[in-house]
Image (cartoon, rainbow, N blue to C red):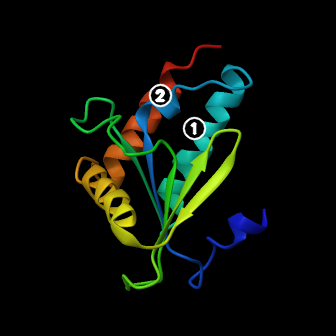
Protein backbone atom coordinates (compact mmCIF):
# COMPACT_ATOMS: atom_id res chain seq x y z
CA UNK A 1 0.00 0.00 0.00
CA UNK A 2 2.88 2.38 0.72
CA UNK A 3 4.34 1.76 -2.75
CA UNK A 4 0.94 2.44 -4.33
CA UNK A 5 0.73 5.73 -2.40
CA UNK A 6 3.89 6.88 -4.22
CA UNK A 7 1.83 7.00 -7.43
CA UNK A 8 -0.89 9.27 -6.03
CA UNK A 9 -1.38 12.98 -6.42
CA UNK A 10 0.47 15.70 -8.28
CA UNK A 11 3.72 14.92 -6.49
CA UNK A 12 3.66 11.20 -7.21
CA UNK A 13 6.50 9.63 -9.11
CA UNK A 14 6.23 9.07 -12.83
CA UNK A 15 6.01 5.34 -13.40
CA UNK A 16 6.27 3.68 -16.80
CA UNK A 17 5.67 -0.03 -17.21
CA UNK A 18 5.61 -2.30 -20.22
CA UNK A 19 3.91 -5.67 -19.80
CA UNK A 20 3.99 -8.45 -22.39
CA UNK A 21 0.49 -9.53 -23.42
CA UNK A 22 1.34 -13.11 -22.41
CA UNK A 23 1.45 -11.94 -18.77
CA UNK A 24 -2.25 -11.05 -18.98
CA UNK A 25 -3.02 -14.69 -19.70
CA UNK A 26 -1.27 -16.06 -16.62
CA UNK A 27 -3.86 -17.21 -14.14
CA UNK A 28 -3.09 -17.43 -10.44
CA UNK A 29 -5.97 -18.01 -8.06
CA UNK A 30 -8.66 -18.84 -10.60
CA UNK A 31 -10.81 -16.85 -13.03
CA UNK A 32 -12.29 -14.45 -10.46
CA UNK A 33 -8.84 -13.45 -9.19
CA UNK A 34 -7.52 -13.03 -12.73
CA UNK A 35 -10.51 -10.87 -13.71
CA UNK A 36 -10.01 -8.68 -10.62
CA UNK A 37 -6.29 -8.28 -11.35
CA UNK A 38 -6.99 -7.23 -14.94
CA UNK A 39 -9.69 -4.80 -13.77
CA UNK A 40 -7.16 -3.28 -11.39
CA UNK A 41 -4.66 -2.83 -14.24
CA UNK A 42 -7.41 -1.25 -16.36
CA UNK A 43 -8.26 1.16 -13.53
CA UNK A 44 -4.61 2.14 -13.08
CA UNK A 45 -4.14 2.80 -16.82
CA UNK A 46 -7.37 4.77 -17.04
CA UNK A 47 -7.18 6.85 -13.85
CA UNK A 48 -3.58 7.51 -12.83
CA UNK A 49 -2.10 10.21 -15.06
CA UNK A 50 1.45 9.75 -13.74
CA UNK A 51 1.37 6.02 -14.49
CA UNK A 52 2.08 5.03 -18.08
CA UNK A 53 1.38 1.33 -18.26
CA UNK A 54 1.27 -0.23 -21.70
CA UNK A 55 0.83 -3.76 -23.00
CA UNK A 56 3.14 -5.10 -25.70
CA UNK A 57 0.84 -7.12 -27.99
CA UNK A 58 1.78 -10.73 -28.66
CA UNK A 59 1.58 -9.91 -32.37
CA UNK A 60 4.38 -7.36 -32.04
CA UNK A 61 7.51 -8.17 -34.08
CA UNK A 62 9.59 -7.68 -30.91
CA UNK A 63 7.33 -9.67 -28.54
CA UNK A 64 9.54 -11.96 -26.52
CA UNK A 65 12.74 -10.23 -27.64
CA UNK A 66 13.71 -8.42 -24.45
CA UNK A 67 17.23 -9.16 -23.26
CA UNK A 68 15.77 -10.26 -19.92
CA UNK A 69 12.26 -11.16 -18.83
CA UNK A 70 12.07 -8.75 -15.87
CA UNK A 71 13.96 -5.49 -16.39
CA UNK A 72 13.50 -2.34 -14.33
CA UNK A 73 15.11 0.87 -15.56
CA UNK A 74 15.79 3.29 -12.74
CA UNK A 75 16.64 6.84 -13.72
CA UNK A 76 16.45 10.35 -12.36
CA UNK A 77 13.78 12.52 -13.92
CA UNK A 78 14.91 13.88 -17.30
CA UNK A 79 18.55 12.88 -16.93
CA UNK A 80 20.66 10.05 -18.31
CA UNK A 81 23.20 10.32 -15.50
CA UNK A 82 22.53 7.99 -12.59
CA UNK A 83 20.68 5.38 -14.63
CA UNK A 84 20.68 1.75 -13.57
CA UNK A 85 19.01 -1.45 -14.65
CA UNK A 86 17.72 -3.99 -12.15
CA UNK A 87 17.32 -7.53 -13.45
CA UNK A 88 14.94 -9.62 -11.37
CA UNK A 89 16.04 -13.23 -11.37
CA UNK A 90 13.63 -15.98 -10.47
CA UNK A 91 14.41 -17.58 -7.09
CA UNK A 92 17.85 -15.90 -6.82
CA UNK A 93 17.32 -12.25 -6.04
CA UNK A 94 18.42 -9.71 -8.59
CA UNK A 95 21.30 -7.91 -10.20
CA UNK A 96 21.91 -4.17 -10.48
CA UNK A 97 23.85 -2.85 -13.49
CA UNK A 98 24.79 0.81 -13.25
CA UNK A 99 27.39 1.43 -15.95
CA UNK A 100 29.09 0.23 -19.07
CA UNK A 101 28.06 -1.35 -22.34
CA UNK A 102 25.83 -3.93 -20.65
CA UNK A 103 23.68 -1.13 -19.17
CA UNK A 104 23.42 0.50 -22.60
CA UNK A 105 22.37 -2.81 -24.21
CA UNK A 106 19.51 -3.24 -21.73
CA UNK A 107 18.38 0.37 -22.12
CA UNK A 108 18.40 -0.02 -25.91
CA UNK A 109 16.39 -3.25 -25.59
CA UNK A 110 13.72 -1.43 -23.57
CA UNK A 111 13.68 1.52 -25.99
CA UNK A 112 13.08 -0.85 -28.90
CA UNK A 113 10.18 -2.56 -27.12
CA UNK A 114 8.51 0.80 -26.49
CA UNK A 115 8.48 1.38 -30.26
CA UNK A 116 5.94 -1.46 -30.69
CA UNK A 117 3.35 -0.43 -28.15
CA UNK A 118 0.17 1.40 -28.93
CA UNK A 119 -1.61 4.22 -27.20
CA UNK A 120 -3.28 4.29 -23.81
CA UNK A 121 -6.56 3.54 -25.59
CA UNK A 122 -5.01 0.52 -27.35
CA UNK A 123 -3.85 -0.82 -23.99
CA UNK A 124 -7.29 -0.31 -22.44
CA UNK A 125 -8.94 -2.19 -25.32
CA UNK A 126 -6.46 -5.05 -25.03
CA UNK A 127 -6.94 -5.40 -21.26
CA UNK A 128 -10.73 -5.24 -21.67
CA UNK A 129 -10.55 -7.92 -24.36
CA UNK A 130 -8.77 -10.24 -21.93
CA UNK A 131 -11.26 -9.45 -19.15
CA UNK A 132 -14.10 -10.36 -21.53
CA UNK A 133 -12.43 -13.68 -22.41
CA UNK A 134 -12.32 -14.97 -18.82
CA UNK A 135 -14.86 -17.69 -18.22
CA UNK A 136 -16.30 -18.42 -14.80
Q: How many other residues sit within 10 Å of disc 1, few (<14), some (14-19) or many (≥20)?
A: some
- Measured from the top left, where is residue 112 in percent x and y? 25, 53
> Which of the two residues, 84 or 12, is positioned nearer the viewer here?
84
Q: Is residue 86 above or below residue 49?
A: above
Determine whether label 1 and label 2 are within 8 Å by CB.
yes
Q: Secondary structure at mark 1?
A: helix
Q: Residue 58: image x %, image y %?
A: 33, 30
Decide which of 52, 69 is in the foreground and name it. Answer: 69
In percent of the image, x 37 and y 57: which residue is there? 106
Q: Which quadrant would the N terminus be assigned to in this image?
A: bottom right
x then y, percent, for residue 85: 49, 64
Residue marked by disc 1? 38
When the figure is inspected, residue 37 is found, relative to residue 120, above or below; the finding is: above
Mark 2: few, some, or many residues within 10 Å (few <14, many ≥20)? Answer: some
Q: Of marks 1 and 2, which one's residue comes earlier in the chain?
A: 1
Where does the image place residue 16, in percent across and percent down from the top left? 46, 63
Name which residue lies at 51% across and 33% down.
23
Q: Is residue 84 above or below residue 108?
A: below
- Residue at 28% over, 48% down: 117
Vertical placement of 130 versus 135: above or below? below
User: Pointer 2: what residue?
Assistant: 130
Amino acid sequence: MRRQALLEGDRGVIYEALIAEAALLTQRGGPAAQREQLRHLYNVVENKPRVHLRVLPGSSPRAGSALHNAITLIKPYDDDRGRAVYLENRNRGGELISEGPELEAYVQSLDELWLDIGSKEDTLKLIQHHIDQIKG
